[in-house]
Structure formats: C-alpha cells, structure tokens
Image (cartoon, helix red, strand yellow):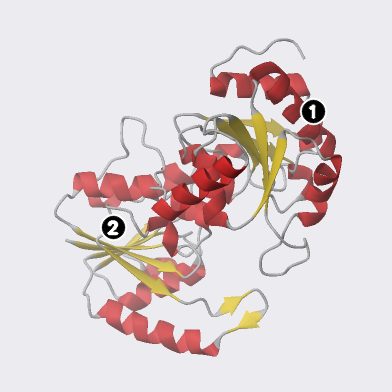
Amino acid sequence: MKVLIIKRDKIGDMLLTTPMLRQLRRALPHAEIHLLANDYNAWVVAENLDVDRLWVYDRVKVGKKIRPLAAIKQLWLELKLRAEHFDVAIVAGGDESKRAITRALRIRATRTIAYCSKSNPLSAKLTDPMPLAPGVHEMDRMLTQLTPLGIQPPTEALYPHFPLPKNARDFALEWLQERNLAPQAYIVLGLGARRAKKQPTTQQILDWSHYFKQRWGLDTVFTWTPGKSDNPQYPGDDEIAQPVLDAGLPNIHPFRGALMPALGLIWNARTSIFPDSGLMHFAAASPGGVLGLFAETDVSPSPAQWGPRGPRADYLEARKSVSEFDDATVLSRIGNLIGHDQDAV
C-alpha cells in the first residue's frame, strides 16, 4: 500500500502529526509512507524514520510576499505526485481545510480521507469524509483519521517525537560551556505566543527566575523570538524581552536566536516554561518536558485541543491573562516536573 499524508500547517502542528505516522507504520509495516509538507514545516519530519519519502512544496505566499514561481513549481509537483498512484491520501489535521482538501483531490489517490462537513461541496468528492470533532485534542483527531483504514488509535500512550539534529546539540553544549552552565542546571523560560495576554509579565519572569535559583540552584535561560511584534511574516518579541534584559540579573541568560539552536538549549534543560506556541510542543517532546501557559481560551485555542503532549508535560489555563497565575501555583507545577517538592512562596 502507498499512503500520502498531506500536512500544510505550522511546525507545532507538524510535530503533533508524528504519533499518527508512528501508528500508521506499526499497523502497516510494509506500506510506503510519503508525506507532503511545505518549505516552512518540512524540517520537523526530515529525519523521521516513519516517513519513506518527504515531498516539499514552496509556499506561494510568505507574509505579504507573493512568489509566482512557487505556484508553477507546485503544479509540477502535483503532476509528479499524481504519477505515484497513491492508494490513500490523508489530509492530516483536525479541522476542515478547503485548500488542503482541494490539493489532495488533485493528486487523485484511490481513497482520500479528510475532515469535512456535509455542507461542504468537497465532501461529495471525498471517498472518506469524516465528521468534525470539536473539543478533541489535535493529536487524537489525526490518529482517528486512520480508522477508515481499519487502524484504531493506540491503547497505550503515544507522544510526539522529534530527533534533535547533531548541529543543535553541538551548539547548545558550546553555548552553555561559554556561560559556565551545565546541562540540566537551568530552566528555559520562553516567550513566543502571538497574543500579549499569553505571555508572562516581566515581574513574573524575574520572580520565577529568582525562585529557581534560590530554591533549586537552577539558572534561567530566557529565550524569545527575535524581531518586532509588527513583522507580518515572523512576529518577534524584542519589545517584551527588553525589560527583562534591563534588569541585568546574573542568573538569567538571554538567548535571542534561531529556532534550531533554541531547541538544543531546550533539550538540555531541566524543564521549560512556554506560552501556547510551537516551541511549547517541542519542549513537551524534550527530555525535561514543559509547563504550557494558556489564557483567554474563549477566543483562542484551548489546552483541551492544543495542550502539550508528552511524558513530562503539564499546563495551566487562565481565564483572561497569564498575569493571573499566582507564583505558588506555577512554582508548584515546576517543582513536580523537576522532581522537587515546592515550599511555600
């Protein structure tokens, strides 16, 4: 059997697809598993052993920039995919995506599986339209997309997986050595959410970092996305990070850098704290795990659907803003993750 998984979303979404790939491989060990990704998220599964072939297409629109050549390349790629004669194409994702469904149908697999409402005209063109499942975690919804093939969700825990590349490991060890920091001797505290209410305040970052050092002897690696918040392509957190830098505390080590080096630091951390973001999901897959921070979930994704998944993953949810979290609650959860009891703050 030849199966094509289509995944056009963000990097965290792609990471959440890896349990689906693992379960598919377990159930069909001799199948050819192909994955179609874009030039933004493909690296997440580039070393995934459950993928036999990775197809990558260039995005036509990046921020406000239009790339006409990318559209031509996409048409050529679709013809190549059509010539593969796939038995099954799966639009991986828990929500309805008209664009992804249309892309899948053009490949003309024998069967095409996707979440699609009955009111959508594309539903009649799918061999296996699946009813939407609101409120179910994204990872579980994708695992359920295997049921038309007779593959049931796993009975045991199955978590997202990412093999950290060697260059990220080497960078982290060198960066830590330059700062006299040992692996596991620090906690990563990151920004990265695109809504201000999901970010910890400056005072929270300073207070939590002080406690990490005084109670557990752990430094803080403070990381954020470089750039200005109004960048249409990749919004950054420089303005939010600056007050923390201005405090100049010796136990806070700032890291303003690229994504892959940041992952190296996360993989060597005792544990991590991140707002709801792609980095939160990667931290959940790391050895130290993560405490995810969610807020204002009445108008933004909730942890029921997008919470971190991993053997050492936890989260907190605030009604309106992360600033509502009291220090004792946050530090108690971190204490659980690092294996220490937490005294009264």
Query: In the image, what residue type sits under mark 1?
Result: Asp
Residue drawn at the location 18% of the way across and 50% of the way down: 28
Q: Nearer the viewer, residue 309 or 91?
A: 309
Query: In the image, what residue type sits under mark 2?
Result: Val
The reply, left or right, for residue 46 in relation to residue 301 is: left
In the picture of the structure, the residue carrying the numbered disc 1 is 207
Specify which label sits upstream in the sequence, 2 or 1: 2
Image: 161 above or below 67:
above
Q: Point out the image quarter for the C terminus.
A: top right
Residue drawn at the location 24% of the way across and 52% of the way down: 149
In the picture of the structure, the residue carrying the numbered disc 2 is 51
- Image x and y of residue 41, in percent: 48, 62
The quadrant where residue 249 appears: top right
Task: Decide: few, some or many residues near mark 2? Use Cα within 10 Å; few <14, some 14-19, many ≥20.
Answer: some
Residue drawn at the location 36% of the way across and 73% of the way down: 105
The quadrant where residue 214 appears: top right
- Image x and y of residue 182, in percent: 54, 33
